[in-house]
Amino acid sequence: MRDSDYERAGKSRRRRFDDDEPDFLKRSPQPQPQSTDEDAPEAGDRWSTWDLSTAGERGPQPYPDWVVTELAAVDTELGIVKTGKEADVHLVRRGVPGTDRDCLMAAKRYRGSEHRMFHRDAGYLEGRRVRESRTNRAMAKRTGFGREMIAGQWAGAEFAALYRLWEAGRQLGVRVVPYPVQILGTELLLEFIGTADGQAAPRLAQLRPEPAELADLWRQLVDALSVLARCQIIHGDLSAYNILVHEGRLVLIDLPQVVDVVSNPHGARLLHRDVCNVGTWFAARGLAGVDVDELTHDLLGQAGIR
């Protein structure tokens, strides 16, 4: 890609894809669903959905010790963590009643076709065509059925990317994404990044790090981008708004629009845009030596593209 193309990509104005709200929302009590199912649990809002996901719809093995896999577990809704145009994230506690066995999870739920969604999906969907021509036509025309299929593609793409990046990060000794617990339809259950009492970790954009912390976060980010590059994956919408920092550890979130840098014709441009977004943020806060063109070139090399 020519340098002029990189420059245009870096300077173009754009809207954030999945995180239009700049701050996490305070958790508010949610109305408890009135179940008519005679088999509903005595406590909580639903039985654990762990057994409803197939083996390929659960996170990488070995499962972390904190993941509750017992079939006697129930899920309890604790409120909304954040909202977006395409999906909302809820806080869910999964636990076995009468025991201390429980965990907090972030439940990301993509919205149905009755909501406005995926307003900027055309470039990301290239290379994600399905076999059925009828489905492809419906997706192209954005019919109700087509929009439902697109929602499923976004959810599936995000889960697959998280699965792959978690495994790659584990092999390389770098944790870059939340652990993907399971996917069921258009609901993703993920490791909750935050405190034990349900306080979500802040986004990078909310922080004002000191110089030493800023340099360390940049190092972590470069390591994370290297993991993505080795997997030939581009985040596609990376910014300081979809990076969490918990106890000094940087975690990438919101990956429904991931791009295969090899198969997608916009791959190199999108990678450069991602690097420009985060590089500009760090440079604006005083970090010296941020060269977005050099980093982009290096990442493309790690992805096998010269």
Image (tube, rainbow, N blue to C red):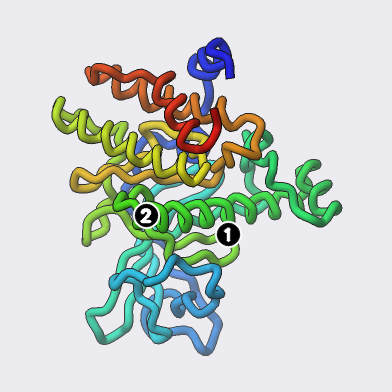
Q: Position of residue 183 (x, y in %)?
A: 52, 64
Residue drawn 33% across and 57% down?
A: 192
Per the image, label 1 sits on a secondary structure element best described as loop
Mark on residue 178?
2
Front-most of residues 28 and 237: 237
Residue type indicated by callout 1: Thr
Residue type indicated by callout 2: Pro
Q: Position of residue 39 (x, y in %)?
A: 51, 88
- Location of mark 1 (residue): 186
Mark on residue 137?
none
Q: Quadrant of the C terminus?
A: top right
Task: Determine crowd level at label 1: few under 14, some 14-19, many 20+ residues with C-alpha closer than 10 A.
Answer: some
Distance from disc 2 to disc 1, alpha carbons, whole Å, reads 17 Å
- Residue furthest top in the image: 4
The earlier-in-sequence mark between 2 and 1 is 2
* Cβ atoms at labels 2 and 1 below 8 Å apart: no
Residue drawn 64% across and 36% down?
A: 264
Front-most of residues 102 and 158: 158
Residue 233 versus residue 191 in the image, above or below: above
Tally of numbered tags: 2
Per the image, label 2 sits on a secondary structure element best described as loop
Front-most of residues 200 and 288: 288
Residue 67 versus residue 191 in the image, above or below: below
Residue drawn 85% across and 53% down?
A: 134
Quadrant in which residue 299 is drawn: top left
Q: Quadrant of the N terminus?
A: top right
9 on left or right of 89? right
Residue drawn 31% across and 39% down?
A: 203
Closer to us: mark 2 or mark 1? 2
Q: Position of residue 291 (x, y in %)?
A: 36, 18
